[in-house]
């Protein structure tokens, strides 16, 4: 009985292994480029793209404009202190919050969540966190949305793609 | 001699059709399979598949896979195109019937023990075919771009996204972004009319070839 484990590697075997490794290398390259092709371009750029919301004169002080940002319902407010933009998907259970001018609130109708229109902070109700702010820029008489202030917000919405 | 006999003779002389076709056409099926309607289920599924291919090709001539045009083009098929509603209804009901037939076929195979040696691999191919059939249904569901389509896809891609570790990436590649939109439509359209038909055709060929080589299994 032979209790020694022996490997015999012939020159042919070695060549075969090397050829296999080279084939794997090229197959890996092909697979990587396919995945790269399929990868959504907006996500590759960090889920952001500069999009025009409205012209400045279309949104006088005290009025709002609804828009879509990264596929999420969002809201642009012209407060006396300036322009503000938030994702309007309620952080509680994903209903769409809206502007209530008579009470000076962003209001979610589902469970009576109230948000501060200046900061997006929760004033009352069940929402666990403030509305996600959107960075905006005013140039050439128009307002543009740039990106989510908190970049990890995109990660959470893509992760919970099934919920609202 | 009839003209059709002449045509047959012309081809037979050149391609030896007799040698080629006789074993296919005259292939004997066992008595227990011919007399028992339960053995028809796979054939019913395949018939549905043929109807789906034919009607699907016609639907693709009017359908437009963009969020602005999709619903309108489906509406156009249903209301304006002559026979359009018939073609789309055939596609719809054949799809439903095919899933039912495939499920029943699998149950027949399971309860009759037809998956046992030497037919293990055909069972594996069959289960893959079942998965492809349901993926067909899922990808076709989005295409009319109505509320049902949108939310079904939202839930489906959400389920894919809940797979640990890789789920998020699968969902991103499937959806083509963080939310369902134009990218999702074209991706699902490509999956529905290009990728899946080619895959299912290859696997069906394997499935049938294995049945032909191994024969139909008898009762337990």
Image: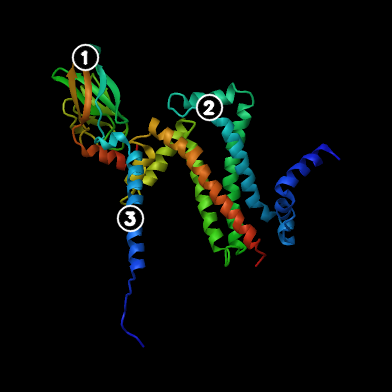
Q: Which residue is at the front of the view, B35 or B26? A: B26
Residue at position x 36%, y 51% in the image? A27
Q: Which residue is at the front of the view, B58 or A72? A: B58
Does dot 3 land on a helix, a strand or a loop? helix
Residue at position x 20%, y 22% in the image? A104
Q: Specify the label residue A56 is tagged with.
A: 1
State the image coordinates of residue A162 (x, y, percent, origin top left). 36, 41
Q: Specify the label residue A22 is tagged with.
A: 3
Residue at the spot of label 2: B74
* Residues flagged by tags 2 and 1 on a common chain: no
For discs 3 and 1, the disc positioned in front in the rendered view: 3
On the image, which quarter does residue A109 sit in? Answer: top left
**Quarter in which the C terminus of chain B is drawn:** bottom right
Residue at position x 39%, y 41% in the image? B174
Q: How far apart are marks 2 and 1 (CA)?
A: 39 Å
* Residues flagged by tags 3 and 2 on a common chain: no
Does dot 2 land on a helix, a strand or a loop? helix
* Parent chain of label 1: A
State the image coordinates of residue B69 (x, y, percent, origin top left). 46, 24
Q: In this view, does A70 lie above or below B127?
A: above
Q: Distance between the residues labelled 3 and 1?
A: 59 Å
């Amino acid at each position: 009985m032979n209790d020694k484990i022996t490997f015999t590697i012939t020159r042919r075997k070695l060549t075969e292994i090397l050829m296999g490794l080279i084939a794997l290398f090229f197959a890996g390259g092909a697979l990587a480029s396919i995945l790269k092709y399929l990868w959504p371009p907006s996500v590759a750029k960090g889920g952001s793209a500069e999009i025009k919301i409205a012209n400045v004169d279309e949104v006088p002080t005290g009025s709002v404009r609804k828009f879509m940002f990264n596929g999420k319902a969002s809201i642009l407010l012209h407060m006396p202190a300036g322009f503000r933009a938030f994702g309007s998907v309620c952080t509680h259970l994903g209903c769409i919050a809206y502007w209530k001018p008579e009470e000076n609130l962003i209001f979610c109708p589902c469970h009576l969540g109230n948000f501060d229109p200046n900061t997006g902070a929760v004033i009352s109700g069940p929402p666990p966190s403030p509305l996600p702010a959107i960075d905006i820029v005013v140039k050439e008489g128009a307002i543009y949305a740039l990106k989510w202030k908190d970049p990890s917000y995109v990660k959470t919405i893509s992760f919970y793609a099934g919920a609202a | 001699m009839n003209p059709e006999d002449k045509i047959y003779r012309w081809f037979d002389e050149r391609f030896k059709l007799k040698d080629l076709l006789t074993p296919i056409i005259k292939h004997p099926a066992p008595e227990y399979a011919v007399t028992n309607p339960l053995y028809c289920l796979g054939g019913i599924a395949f018939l549905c598949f043929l109807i789906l291919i034919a009607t699907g090709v016609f639907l693709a001539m009017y359908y437009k896979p963009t969020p602005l045009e999709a619903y309108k083009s489906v509406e156009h098929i249903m209301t304006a195109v002559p026979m359009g509603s018939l073609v789309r209804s055939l596609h719809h009901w054949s799809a439903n019937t095919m899933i039912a037939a495939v499920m029943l076929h699998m149950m027949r195979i399971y309860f009759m023990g037809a998956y046992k040696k030497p037919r293990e691999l055909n069972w594996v191919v069959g289960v893959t075919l079942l998965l492809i059939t349901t993926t067909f249904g899922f990808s076709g569901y989005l295409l009319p771009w109505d509320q049902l389509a949108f939310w079904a896809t939202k839930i489906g891609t959400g389920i894919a996204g809940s797979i640990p570790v890789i789920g998020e990436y699968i969902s991103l590649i499937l959806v083509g972004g963080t939310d369902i939109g134009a990218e999702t439509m074209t991706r699902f359209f490509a999956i529905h009319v290009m990728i899946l038909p080619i895959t299912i055709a290859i696997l069906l060929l394997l499935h049938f070839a294995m049945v032909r080589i191994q024969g139909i299994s008898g009762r337990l």
